[in-house]
Amino acid sequence: MLRKGSLTGLLLFGIFFGAGNLIFPPALGVQSGSHFWPAIAGFVLSGVGIAIITLIFGTLNPKGYIHEISRKIAPWFAIVYLVALYLSIGPFFAIPRTATVAYEVGISPLLPKDMTGLGLIVFTTIYFAAAYLISLNPSKILDRIGRILTPVFAILIIILIILGAFKYGSAAPQQASAIYAASAFGQGFLEGYNTLDALASVAFSVIAVTTLNQLGFKNKKEYVLTIWIVGLIVALAFSAMYIGLGYLGNHFPVPAEVIAKGNPGVYVLSQATQAIFGPTAQIFLAVMVTVTCFTTTAGLIVSTGEFFNNTFPKVSYKTYATIFTLIGYAIANLGLNAIIQYSVPVLQILYPVTIVIVMIVIVNKFLPLSKIGMQVTVALVTLIALASILGSLFKVKEVMDTINTLPFSQASLPWLLPALLGIILSLILPDKQKSESFEIEA
């Protein structure tokens, strides 16, 4: 059981480990300053805790989240939500981000400053052409490369963290940015959204179920215990990685002009690698980060293309793969900071909806819930998330004042109390549903 859990945990760690997992923790470390510990606590809660709970409870139902959402809310909502989710972890955010992180962490530091713009175009052209060719004929080679190289790269990052802690641990942190000084935990929680892991968990739970079924189990109890082992392994690995990378960023010297330009996580990774291992280490870093991000890109093109082909089969898989590759290529050339900037509002809508769906699934595992109540709960959280973002984007003072009156709004969780009240309401209203049980073949 432990062996099966460890094997599956290693596979999922390799699948999850990508661009966002590298750049956001050190950036948080730089920007949070003396408020690092509450900030990283918020980051780990949303970036690891929610992602792993989402994965575990998605895996506990082999039929997946599409079945859970269709049954508890509505089939049309399941399609709309999952389309938005797959587009987010696919061509709009995650796919282009993997390419730009590979370029900015690995390739850009090797080029003259006046060539970085042209270099990005040339790099992404080759990168996406290769990813597209592999996505047309997905095979085990991609999985094997990812499963071998990603853990190797993770081990190298851990070595960097340990050596960096010894070398820079005594240095004073940067001054915290105003937003972290005001609400370190809340901002850290929001930054955890940027990893996309909770959203990816909805999709990757299907991969986890497939992998676990291939291993075979004596009974349902062994299957469930193995799932919890998988979750524990992935959670511990990512928590240690995030805290270590954040701590490195918190103490590594970063010039003010770099912080002002945008995400300083790229700078910390590249410069810390060169400072600790020497200038030639940048070449090795370039190869490793590019290959690691590349396997993620190709895998995301495949999984997103397959989802859309299964959901809307009138269009071929090849057409979807082509469209998503071209979209990813176009957005990647906007640059990393632009991708992060326009992705944030969408993530701040999708994440609360995802969290409340998982909350409903968890409670319904133990208690029957009213379908009307569950629908109202999801609708309420969606409305609050939309109002928060639209009010902030369009500077609608009345809307923001209303949102700020809600409990936990200062911790960036204005939707939390309405979600809890909605679930309580679901315990009272009629038309209750019991959670479906499942059996596995011995």
Image: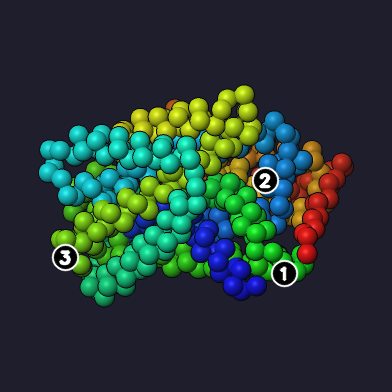
For marks 1 and 2, give the one nearer the viewer. 1
Instruction: Determine crowd level at label 1: few under 14, some 14-19, many 20+ residues with C-alpha closer than 10 A.
Output: few
Would residue 287 appear left or right of 397 to someone viewing this image?
Answer: left
Q: Residue at x 56, y 28 (%)?
A: 316
Q: Residue at x 34, y 64 (%)?
A: 157
Residue projecting furthest to the top: 314
Residue assigned mark 2: 65
Position of residue 278 relative to residue 430, above or below, is below
Instruction: Determine crowd level at label 2: few under 14, some 14-19, many 20+ residues with C-alpha closer than 10 A.
Output: many
Q: Nearer the viewer, residue 362 or 219?
A: 219
Callout 1: helix, strand or loop?
helix
Residue type at the position of mark 3: Gly
Residue type at the position of mark 1: Glu
Disc 1 to disc 2, how far (Cα)? 22 Å
> Residue 360: x percent and y percent?
71, 49
Q: Earlier in the sequence, mark 2 or mark 3?
A: 2
Q: Earlier in the sequence, mark 1 or mark 2?
A: 2
Callouts 2 and 3 close, C-beta under 8 Å: no
Position of residue 168 relative to residue 363, above or below, is below
Q: Image quarter for residue 7?
A: bottom right
Residue 182 numbered mark, or none = none
Q: Image quarter for residue 246?
A: bottom left
Disc 2 to disc 3, how far (Cα)? 47 Å
Q: Residue at x 59, y 37 (%)?
A: 307
Residue assigned mark 3: 278
Quadrant for the C terminus in the image? bottom right
Q: Is residue 66 visible?
A: yes
Instruction: Determine crowd level at label 3: few under 14, some 14-19, many 20+ residues with C-alpha closer than 10 A.
Output: few
Residue assigned mark 1: 222
Residue type at the position of mark 2: Tyr
